[in-house]
Amino acid sequence: MSGSVRLAICATLATVAAGCALLPLVDASGWLFQALLLLAVQSAVGVAARRVPLARPLTVAAQALTSLVLLTLVFAQGQALGGLLPSPQALQEFALLLRSGADDVGRYAIPAPLTDGIRLLLIGGVLVIGLVVDALAVTYRSAAPAGLPLLALYSVAAGLSDDSGDWLWFLVAAAGYLVLLLAEGRDRLSQWGRVFSGGARHPGGAPPSGLAGAGGGQALAPVRNGRRIGVLALGIALAVPAALPSLDGGLLDEKNGGSGSGSSGGTISAVNPLVSLQDSLNQPENKEVLRYRTSSQTTQDLYLRIVALDKFDGTSWKSSERHVTDVPDQMPSPAGLGPSVRVSSVDTTITAADWYAQNWLPLPYPATKVEIDGRWRYEPEGRTLVGDRGQTTRGEQYRVSSLLVEPTAEQLAGAPAPPKRLLREYTQVPDSLPPVVSRTARQITKGADNAYKKAVKLQDWFAVNGGFRYDTQVQSGSGSAAIVRFLKQKEGFCVHFSFSMAAMARTLGIPARVAVGFTPGTTQADGSVSVGLKDAHAWPELYFEGVGWTRFEPTPSRGTQPDYTMEQTPTGEPSDEPSDEPSASSEPSAAPTASDTCPPQMKKEGSCDGPAAQVPDSGSSGGGWSASKVTGWSALAVLLVVVPLLPMVWRRRVRSRRLGGSAGRTDQDAADRTLAAWRELVDSAWDFGVVPDDSQTSRNTVARIVRIAGLEDGTDEAAEAARRVATAVEQVLYAPRPHPSAGIADDVRQVLAGLRSRATRWERLRALLLPRSAARLVWAAADRRSALLNRWTTPRWVTRLRNQRG
C-alpha cells in the first residue's frame, strides 16, 4: 500500500472519529455509517485524481463535485437530472432542507429526531470537514493544520451537547488525529528509504547499520510536533465549549424541552411531533401509550390532542412561538364558541405509560380544567399544556374536564365572517406554494357558497371521492413540494391529508391549522380505552365564528368523520357532490366513484359495494409487513444464522477437496494428492489446538501432533496412521523416484477420528464451528489484497524494467 493511500485512509478515519462526537445530538446513529460510505467514495476519488495525477486544485474540485453528486443522490434524487446530476431544482431542495434543518436544530431537545434537514446538516458537515482534512493532509501533504477542522467539528458537538461523556468522544477524535500525524510522519520518512520506526526489519532483528542513527532528530520531529499540536488542541477543545454562551430551547437545551422558565410568563417554541408520527404508525407492535376512562357515552369524537401547528412557511407546518402562563384552575371559554351551540361536559381520567415521555400533554379538545401534578405551563392560543424544565408525560395520571361541542350543519353554514386577526394569521400561505394547490381547491369547491360547504367538499374529496389511498410507507414531507407530490400521486398518510386540506382551506380564505395527537383508541373489556402508537394521527381544524375551532377528518380509513359534516346541504338544493364539476381539467378530478346512495362515512370506511370500495384499508393499522421489512428481516436472519456457519462450511469443503477424488493418472497427480492430504492433517490438528510449526520436518511434525494431542501410544491406530502419512510425504519430497502410498486419505481420516475421540465436547464444537485453520482464508485474502495493491500502485513500466534487470 502506497503512503498516499495509507494517508488518505487515515484522514477518512480521523474525520469519522471526530464525527462520532455528534452521535449524542440525535436519537439515531445510522447517519454516521452513511456518512462513512460517502466519505470513503470522496476519498477514493482523491486517491484516483492524485494518481493520474491532476493538479492539486483540480483534485479538490473533483472531490467536491463528487460529494455534491453523492448528496444529490441521497437527498434530492427526485429533483436531479437522471436521478443523479444536480439541477436547479435539486439545489432548491437542498436550500429547503438546510433551512428546515436549521429550524429543527433550534426546536428540538437533545437527542433530537433525525429529520431530513438534520441528517443533511450532519452528513454534509462531515463531508465538508473530510474534504478539508483530505486536502490538507494528503493533497497538500500538511497533516498538522488538518487538526483545526477536526477540532472545529468536535467543538461544535461538545458545545451543543450536555453529555457527561464528552471527554470520551474527545479521546476518539484525538486518537484519529494522532494516527493521521503518525501516518504522515511515516510517509515522509519512507521517502528517505526508511520507515518511521527507525529502519527496515531484518531477519536477525538488528537494524541496518548507519540508518537508525542518521537523521534521528528528523525522525522525532513529527512526533514532537504532533505532541505540541495535541496539547494545543486539547486546551482549545476544553476551553471552547466552556466559553460558548448558554443557549436555551430546542436542541440546545434538553432540560427546558423548548419551554420558557419562570412562574408567570415566558414563551414556547413548539417541538414538532410529526417527525416520529410516521415511525409510530409503522411500528410492528401497537404499544400502548395511554389508557383512559371517560364519562362520555361514545368515544368516537374524543380525539386526544397534543399540539396545534398553525404556521406554514412553505417548508413545513410548525407551531408559532407563544406566550405561556401558569395552568389556570378553570380555563377560559374556547375562542369563538357561541351560546347557541349545544355542548356537554365530559370528565376523563388518563394514565400515560411509563415509557411514554412527551413534553406536550394529550388532552381532549377543548379542555376546560386539568388536574395534574408536576411542572406544567398553559398556552392559551392552542389551549395546550407543555412541560417545564424537563417535565414529561412519563407515568403521569391526570384528570381532564372538557366540552363535547356538537354544532349543526346549519350553524356552521350560517357562521359569520371570522375576526380580522384570525383571518390575517390563519389564512397565510407562503409565496412558494404552487398555484396548483389553490387551483385544485377552487375546482373541488366550485358551486359552494359558504366556508362550511367548501370544507365538507374538501374533506369528502380526500376521504371518499378523490381516489386517494392511505399508505404509511410513502415518503413523509410537510412542505409545498410534498403537497403537490401528494395531490399528483394520491397516496399518503394522515400528515399528507391534513396538511393538504389545511393549505387548501387557507387558499379559500378559511382559517385553518393542523392538530396532532391520537384518535380515540380501542375500548377494552373492563370499560377503559387503550390508545396505542398506531393511533397517532394528524387532522385539520378549521375556524367558524360561533363554533370555534372545528375538527374535520380527510384521511380515509382513519378516525371518524364528525356528524356535522355528514349533512351535505341543510336545504333542498342540488347535491354538492364534486361529480357536478367539469372533468376536462388536467388537475386532479373531483368526480365521485361511488353511488350517491352510500353515506360518506361508509364510503370513507370502504364499506360500500362498487367502485367506492377501491380505497384499501390495509394501511389502517399503520402498515404491515412490507416488502422492505421482509427483505430487511431476511437479511438479518442470514447474517445471524448463515454467516456464523461460513467457517464450518468452508472447512468441510476444503477437507472434501483434499481427501476426495481419484489418485490421478500421473505420478505428479499422486504426489499433489499426498501433499494435499498432508496439509489436511496439519490443519485438522490445528483445529484441535496443535498450532502448526513450519520449521519442523514432516516426521517431527507428526511426533509433535501425537504428543500434544495425546496419541502417544505406539499401538494407537491414529498415531500409526499419522506416521504413515509423514513417511508418504518424505517419499514425495526427498526420494529420487517417489512412490506415493495408497490409502493416504483414509489415514488422514483415521487421525482426525483419533483427534475427535480424545478432545472434550467443547473442543469438538470449537473445531467444527470455529476451526482455527480458517485463518488461512484470511491470510490468502491479505496476500491477494497486497498483490492487487502492488499491481495498482506500481506502474507497469517499472515492473517490466525490474523483470528485465532480473
Image (cartoon, rainbow, N blue to C red):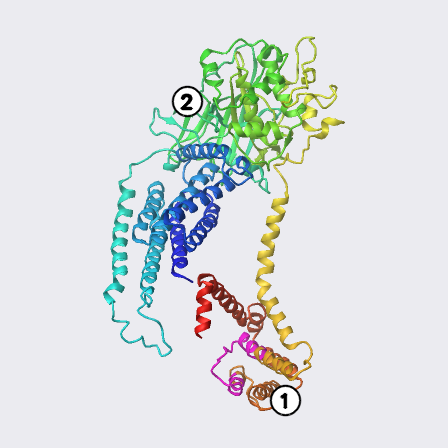
User: Which segment is the magenta one?
Assistant: 680-704
Outermost left residue? 217
Q: Amino acid at mark 2?
A: Pro
* Quadrant of image for the N terminus: bottom left
The spot of residue 620 in percent (x, y) is: 64, 34
Please give the name of the residue rendered at 40% of the width and 25% of the height, measured from the top-left corner: 321
Which residue has dot 1 on it? 739
Q: Residue 455 sits in which quadrant? A: top right
Image marks 2 and 1: residues in contact by CB distance under 8 Å:
no
The spot of residue 618 in percent (x, y) is: 67, 36
Camera sees residue 517: no
How many residues crowd around disc 1 within 10 Å: few (fewer than 14), some, or many (20 or more)?
Answer: few
Does 574 sit left or right of 354 as displayed? Answer: right
Q: Nearer the viewer, residue 500 or 213?
A: 213
The spot of residue 294 in percent (x, y) is: 57, 27
* Quadrant of image for the C terminus: bottom left
Which residue has dot 2 on it? 328
Please give the name of the residue rendered at 51% of the width and 14% of the height, measured from the top-left corner: 337
Q: Is residue 779 magenta?
A: no
How many residues crowd around disc 2 within 10 Å: few (fewer than 14), some, or many (20 or more)?
Answer: few
Q: Is residue 702 magenta?
A: yes
- Give the structural element (helix, strand or loop) at label 2: loop
Does 270 sit left or right of 670 as displayed? Answer: left
Rendered view: 317 above or below 426: below
- Give the structural element (helix, strand or loop) at label 1: loop
* Dominant secondary-structure state across the stretch colored magenta: helix
Measure the alpha-carbon separation of dots 2 and 1. 103 Å
Rendered view: 650 above or below 473: below
